[in-house]
Structures are given as structure tokens and as C-alpha cells.
Image: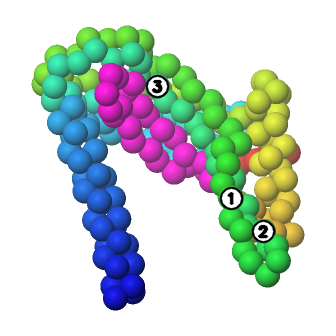
Amino acid sequence: MQEEMIIYAIVGVVVAGLLGFGAVWVLRRMKGTILLRMDNATADSGKPFRGTIDLSINKAMESHALEVALIAKETIKERRDGKTHTRTEEVYRSTKTVEGPTLYSAGDKKSYTFEINAPSGADSTQELGATAQMMLGAAAQFLGSNRRVKWKLEARLDAPGLDLVTTKNVHVNVII
């Protein structure tokens, strides 16, 4: 009897999670869609990623901003006490505003070009720290450590309620 209750509880949590995810997806689609098209998915340190953000608005709204961000997350797997522990943390974020506050009408379709540079390490202390992290990650991968840095570009229409968001995985070539 006890095992059945646990199974029902697990099934209930999974179903609730799926319903919640579905509801968020439907609400976002009611607002509109955002598409990120990339000219290049790889860039050397200090070089730009270029692309286009396509917006299709289904419901009139006022946005706070349309932004593109380059984000790096490092995943570290460590073995302690006979167990594997995994943690992920954001080690770099650079955000660029593509367009400020805008009033969109239902049915609007707009395209915006953008350019955002991969970190070079000399532009700011944040980038210097991220470049050091990248170099350590590259060295750790070479030595067989369990550290991995994943990069992505995120386009976000910041608006009241749910934001319209999309991401694309990209690669930054670390040039030392």
C-alpha cells in the first residue's frame, strides 16, 4: 500500500509538471513567437556573432526591450565520497539591447539584425574572468577533467507577463 502511494505521488508530480510546462508554452504562443537565425554559430575570442531576430506578434503588447545575450555555463562533475556531484553555474553573460521599449500591434512581423562579440579578455573584468574560466575549462578538458563550458545565444522580448525567449547553442574558440 505504501509503495502504491509513492508511485501515485510521483505520477502526480510528473503530470502536474507537464501540465504546467504546457500551460506556459500555450500562453507564450498566444503572445507571439520569436526566432533566432544565426549567420555564424562559431566565433573566435573578440569576434562577433551575427544574426537576425524575427518577431511575430499575435497579441498587442508593449515591450520593455528586445535583447540578445551571449551566455556561458560551466558544468563541473566532481567525485566525492564515492558519489558524483554535478553543478552548473553561469560564468559569463553579455547582454545587448537590440530595441528599447516598443508598442507592438497584433499581427506585427518584424526582423532585427544584431551583432554581439565573443569575450576577448581585455574588454572588462567580467570578460577577463570569463576568459580565464574558458582557458581553465579548455586545459581541464585536455587533461581529462570533468569541466565543460557551454555557450548559447539568447534572444528575449522582455514584456509584461511571460517573455518571448529563444536560444541557440554556439561555440567560442578560445584564442590564448
Please, is residue 114 above or below residue 26 in the view?
A: above
Label 3 or label 2, whichever comes before in sequence order = 3
Q: Residue at x 57, y 27 (%)?
A: 95
- Point out the image quarter for the N terminus: bottom left
Mark whose residue sits in front, 3 or 1? 1
SS label for mark 2:
strand
Quadrant assignment for the C terminus: top right
Overall secondary structure of the magenta section: strand
Magenta stretch: includes residue 167: yes
Q: What element carries label 3?
A: strand
Camera-side mark, 3 or 2: 2
Give the Cα separation between the discs numbered 3 and 1.
27 Å
Residue at x 39% of width, y 86% of height: 3
Amino acid under disc 2: Glu
Give the crowd class for mark 1: few <14, some 14-19, many >=20 residues within 10 Å: few
Residue 169 vertical placement versus 28 (above, below)? below
Check residue 87 in the rendering and tell me which mark sits there, or answer none. 1
Magenta extent:
149-172
Is 169 on the left or on the right of 110, as rendered?
right
Residue 77 sits above or below residue 5 on the image: above
